[in-house]
Amino acid sequence: QVQLVESGGGLVQAGGSLRLSCAASGSIFSINTMGWYRQAPREQRELVATITSGGTTTYADSVKGRFTCSRDNAKNTVSLQMNSLKPEDTAVYYCSADVIVSAADLIAQRTYTYWGQGTQVTVSS
């Protein structure tokens, strides 16, 4: 099994910054894409950012220029640096990882998606 442990959430004022971190551990052969999602009250879950094993990133339009996603493959960690935070960024943020758990799964290009427990980010006006 794979576990994702998130940290870094909290309460900040508009215009402030937070950095979220997520560490993956367990039965991991390798990790393809890692990502961050968020869900605000009464809203659908939204993709925030993704990053491939090679470091290629994508971002939601709403966070481009403000958020930066990075990863450390040696440590199986992914981070999300959030700057110029806005009240509309308030949400529970979830880390995800597309994990290859065995050599057989690598050959088959089979990944399993795991999720962290979520961490609350609250941005006050």
Image (cartoon, rainbow, N blue to C red):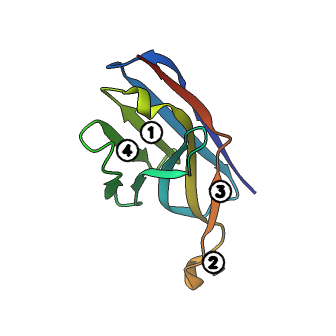
Q: Is residue 108 above or below residue 68?
A: below
Give the spatial CA distance, label 3 vs label 4. 18 Å
Seen as rendered, the residue at the extreme front is 42
| Residue lying farthest to the right in this orientation | 1
Precedes in sequence: disc 4 or disc 1: 4
Tag 3: residue type?
Tyr
Asked if the residue at tag 1 contacts the one at tag 4, i.e. Cβ–Cβ closer than 8 Å, the answer is yes
Residue 79 bears which disc, if any? Answer: 1
Q: Residue at x 59, y 29 (%)?
A: 120
Please say whether residue 8 is visible from this viewpoint: no
Q: Please, which residue is most extreme toward the left here?
A: 65
Image location (x, y in percent) of residue 32: 49, 64
User: Where is the N terminus found, in terms of image quarters?
Assistant: bottom right
Inter-mark Cα distance, 4 to 1: 5 Å
Residue identified by numbered label 3:
114
Quarter of the image for the C terminus: give it: top left
User: Which one is earlier in the sequence, the residue at label 2 or at label 4?
Assistant: 4
Seen at 36% across and 27% down, the residue is: 85
* Residue 121 image position (x, y, % from top left): 53, 28
Q: Nearer the viewer, residue 43 or 21?
A: 43
Q: Which residue is mark 2?
A: 105
Q: Amino acid at mark 2?
A: Asp
Is tag 3's residue or tag 4's residue first in the polypeptide sequence? 4
